[in-house]
Every structure is written in structure tokens, then in C-alpha cells.
Image: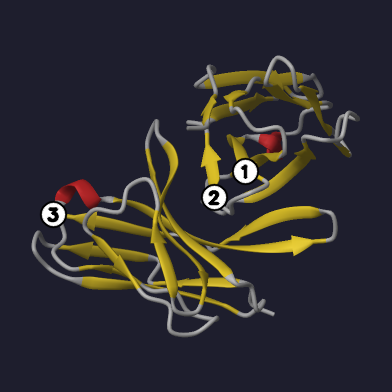
Amino acid sequence: NAGVTQTPKFQVLKTGQSMTLQCAQDMNHEYMSWYRQDPGMGLRLIHYSVGAGITDQGEVPNGYNVSRSTTEDFPLRLLSAAPSQTSVYFCATFGEEGAYNEQFFGPGTRLTVL
Amino acid sequence: AQTVTQSQPEMSVQEAETVTLSCTYDTSESDYYLFWYKQPPSRQMILVIRQEAYKQQNATENRFSVNFQKAAKSFSLKISDSQLGDAAMYFCAYRSAHTDKLIFGTGTRLQVFP
């Protein structure tokens, strides 16, 4: 049971390049989300999905696209990278554990845009 | 909109001593969940403790406990018998019972001195 996996762990891009951050989970959770973490700002929600075929915007969606074709995968696409997108990106899933509701986080991807 | 505020960017504590990290939040809802996450240098987000708003009893997990004051919208984390491994960023987070979105504070960096 791998939980939530993210690839790559590190990535350096040039301005204008595109790339996809991968996120996969094996817990059969319906809810998946992407956050970015910047110094002094905590984690901010980019996009989320409540199930296959359903996505919605979070707090900071501009410059990012997502799709959800399967329960397991939730890729985050940067179509034209900008230096402002330099950040650490976390994928998370939500699962109900008894009476509690916990989000499980992937290990993160550190992205640098030059 | 809900907000989470952590007013202490940095805190320090001596090994074996007790430290309290502060968190306040703003919401008009009555049904929600509160969390404390730990982020060590490895970047992994680790759930430390969670509290359901309808429960009056403060949550406790070994050396970690919370002081949940619903009327004051305060949710502080107390770490007893601090250990060197407790050194990390700590994030307070809020989730409404009606959505799946986590809202994070800006974090508190905890240093533990021997």
C-alpha cells in the first residue's frame, strides 16, 4: 500500500516550458487535491476533485490545469511555466477514517522555474 | 470565507520542556474539524492531532494535546516533554464539515534545543 505518490521529486523548468506533475493513490479515495507551499504562506489549494470526471478550482488556480479520468490519478499541468510558479507542490487525498476525516499527503515536488 | 491565523512564526523550547503553539480561526459555521500537521525537513506532512468541533473534550495524542476554545475560535497545540525530533514546521488547518477543502495557517517553526 503505497498511499499517495508524486513524481518527480524535483524539477527545474525554463520560463514558458510545460510539464505535468503526477499524483497517484491506491487508497480508492474519491477526493484528491493539489496544494502549493510557499515560504510564509502555508499551503494553498490549487485545484481539487471529488471523483473521476469532476474537478474544481481552489484558491490559486491560475496557470494550472487538472483532469481526473480515473480514481487513482490526478495530474497537475503547467502549460507555460512562470517564475511565480516556483514552489513545493503537494498532492493530497481525503478519506474518512471512522469518526475522523484525515487528508493524506504525498511527499511533495519541488519545482523551480528559471 | 474561513481563515486560519498562526501568529508565531517561530518558537523555541528546551528539550523535555513544554511549549504551546497558537492558532486562531474565523468561521461562521458550527460544524467543522481542526488539525495540526507537522512538517519536518523531509517535507512530508504528518498529521499530529485532530479535533471535531462538536466534541467539547480536548484531543490528546501521547505528548501532544490541544486546547480547543470554540467560542474564542482558538485551537492551540501543547507539546509536553519536548524531544529533538519535534523540531519542525507546524501547521494548523481548518476543514468545514460541508466541504473537503483544508485551509492552512502560515505555520510556526519550532526549534528544540538540547
Residue B89 in the image, given as x and y percentages of width and height:
56, 36
Q: Chain of mark 1?
A: B
Residue that numbered label 2 is attached to: B101
The reply to whether the C-beta atoms of the residues labelled 2 and 1 are less than 8 Å apart is yes
Which secondary structure, mark 1? strand
Q: Are marks 2 and 3 on the same chain?
A: no
> Nearest the camera: B112 or B62?
B62
Vertical comparison of B83 with B75: above or below: below
Residue B49 in the image, given as x and y percentages of width and height:
76, 41
> Nearest the camera: B83 or A77?
A77
Vertical comparison of B24 with A80: above or below: above
Which secondary structure, mark 3? loop
Comparing marks 2 and 3, which lies closer to the viewer?
2
- Label of residue B95 in the image: 1
Residue A95 lies in quadrant: bottom right
**Quarter containing the C terminus of chain A:** bottom left
> Label 3 is placed on what type of residue?
Leu
Residue A15 lies in quadrant: bottom left
> Label 2 is placed on what type of residue?
Lys
- Label of residue A114 in the image: 3
- Label of residue A96 in the image: none
Point out the tag, 2 or 1, that comes first from the N-terminus: 1
Q: Residues within 10 Å of mark 3 (few under 14, many from 20)?
A: some
Q: Chain of mark 2?
A: B
Vertical comparison of A66 with A87: above or below: below
> Label 1 is placed on what type of residue?
Arg
